[in-house]
């Protein structure tokens, strides 16, 4: 009888150990300690009694979760490496989170407009993304979205934008577009009226004119002053390397020189050059959309295109999983498609915050001095964000559980 009791006790104890290690990143240590306790005390009467109680609790919990799985949202919480900033949230499992909006930075007027489109007007997620991003274009959010900001080396402002539809997986984008203010709206026209995904430069401008958009000068007195100041400071900073005259001290024109120095994007001092608006929306029918809009990097080389209009980099949405949007050093971000990677991490079971963090961690492995952030949202409205390189990062959210758009903060800690 003792041997039988010990056998049952060991098998059930191993199940308890397996259960206790679920969701823990360092589960091997917990499992090791648990098994040591089993082998030492498994034949004790008191251990058998405690073990059977634990087994009963686990079985009861399993039945409870099974019964309520259709009405409760369940999350697996993982904690990534300490160097990745995370937002700390507790998730009520029964709250209705739809419809919902999330966007990069504290651009709350854009969030508010997108939320009104969904909650008051009953329009689609695509409408919310377009109208929300349009607010930032008109308000020139932080000087990094819309007209009159981020002049290139010639003093000209150009615009990048993209929009993506979750149910159909269609996408439209424009890059380096001149003389048209409504970049996100032109991007939607590309999606709805062509078989293309991305139009660039003068071609994007001509397409917009055909679609009825007004030609306007994107340069303002402020952007012209920024450009003039940059010229008087010997064109510092700039994006050139391995050229003559030495770009750290001189303006161009430049000619190639011997490639002799390693340089890493994201190490030069640019002010307010990362604040792309990226947005993900879910409407009342559960349909998703995402989009971005920006005027690119300040003092960029003419013709440069960043991450914002690139599908999977600036933003990405999969109707079966969720969506994400990125902001930061675009020339680095676009090499890793962080929005796509974040959605794929969520597909594999990660929470939005953890998925975003792991996407950024991959980039940091190659470019430890870059700056970037990702916001993400699952199809059920669960949201989160992560950042790297900035001191902190803000993003805005609106959903049925919040009375108004709310700004969340994420601390970004550099690796030790």
Image: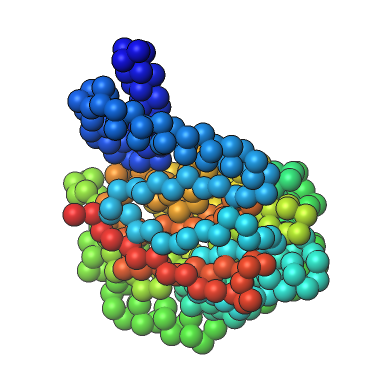
Q: Is residue 275 left or right of residue 362?
A: right
Residue 76: percent from left, percent from top: 47, 45
Work out whether residue 20 or residue 192 is closer to the camera in this orientation and state it: 20
Q: Considering only vertical position in the picture, is 130 above or below 382? A: below
**In front of the other: 18 or 153:** 18
- The answer to whether 86 is drawn above or below residue 258 in the figure is below
Q: Position of residue 97 (x, y in %)?
A: 64, 60
Q: Residue at x 73, y 45 (%)?
A: 167
Please determine whether, in this image, residue 239 is positioned above or below residue 334: below
Q: Is 75 on the left or on the right of 173, as rendered?
A: left
Looking at this view, is 181 or 62 the one in front?
Answer: 62
Image position of 170 with respect to 188: above or below: above
Q: Residue at x 60, y 50 (%)?
A: 73
The reply to whether residue 133 is visible in this rendering is: no
Q: x and y percent of residue 284 in the render? A: 76, 59
The colouring scheme, among rainbow, by chain, secondary structure or one colour, is: rainbow
Residue at far bottom of view? 221
Residue 158 placement: quadrant? bottom right
Quadrant housing residue 69:
top right
Residue that appears at 68% across and 70% down: 115
Residue 310: image location, x then y, percent: 55, 50
The quadrant of the image that shows the C terminus is bottom left
Residue 86, quarter of the rendered image: bottom left
Question: Is residue 221 visible in the rendered structure shown here?
Answer: yes
Looking at the rendered image, the quarter that the N terminus falls into is top left
User: Which residue is painted at 59% across and 42% down in the image?
Assistant: 64
């Amino acid at each position: 009888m003792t041997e039988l009791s010990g056998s049952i006790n060991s098998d059930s104890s191993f199940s308890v150990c397996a259960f206790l290690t679920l969701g823990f990143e360092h589960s091997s240590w917990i499992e090791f300690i648990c098994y040591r306790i089993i082998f030492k005390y498994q034949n004790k009467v008191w251990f058998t009694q405690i073990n059977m109680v634990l087994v009963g609790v686990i079985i009861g919990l399993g039945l409870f979760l099974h019964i309520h799985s259709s009405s409760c949202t369940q999350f697996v919480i993982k904690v990534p490496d300490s160097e990745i900033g995370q937002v700390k949230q507790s998730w009520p499992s029964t709250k209705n989170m739809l419809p919902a909006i999330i966007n990069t930075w504290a651009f709350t007027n854009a969030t508010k407009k997108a939320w009104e489109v969904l909650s008051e007007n009953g329009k689609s997620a695509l409408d919310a993304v377009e109208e929300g991003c349009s607010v930032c274009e008109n308000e020139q959010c932080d000087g990094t979205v819309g007209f009159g900001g981020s002049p290139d080396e010639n003093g000209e402002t150009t615009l990048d934008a993209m929009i993506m539809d979750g149910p159909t997986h269609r996408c439209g984008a424009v890059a380096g577009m001149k003389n048209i203010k409504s970049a996100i709206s032109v991007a939607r026209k590309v999606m709805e009226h062509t078989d293309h995904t991305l139009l660039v430069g003068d071609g994007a401008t001509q397409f917009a004119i055909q679609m009825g958009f007004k030609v306007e000068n994107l340069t303002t007195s402020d952007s012209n002053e920024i450009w003039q100041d940059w010229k008087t400071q010997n064109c510092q900073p700039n994006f050139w390397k391995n050229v003559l005259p030495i770009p750290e001290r001189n303006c161009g024109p430049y000619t190639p020189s011997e490639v002799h120095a390693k340089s890493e994007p994201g190490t030069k001092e640019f002010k307010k050059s990362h604040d792309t608006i990226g947005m993900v929306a879910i409407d009342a029918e559960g349909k998703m959309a995402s989009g971005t809009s920006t005027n690119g990097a300040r003092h960029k080389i003419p013709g440069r295109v960043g991450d914002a209009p690139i599908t999977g980099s600036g933003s990405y949405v999969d109707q079966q999983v969720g969506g994400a949007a990125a902001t930061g050093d675009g020339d680095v971000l676009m090499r890793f498609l962080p929005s796509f990677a974040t959605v794929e991490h969520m597909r594999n079971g990660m929470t939005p915050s953890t998925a975003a963090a792991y996407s950024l961690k991959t980039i940091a492995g190659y470019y430890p001095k870059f700056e970037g952030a990702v916001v993400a949202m699952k199809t059920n409205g669960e949201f989160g964000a992560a950042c790297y390189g900035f001191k902190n990062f803000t993003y805005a959210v609106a959903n049925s559980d919040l009375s108004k758009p709310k700004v969340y903060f994420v601390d970004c800690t550099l690796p030790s």
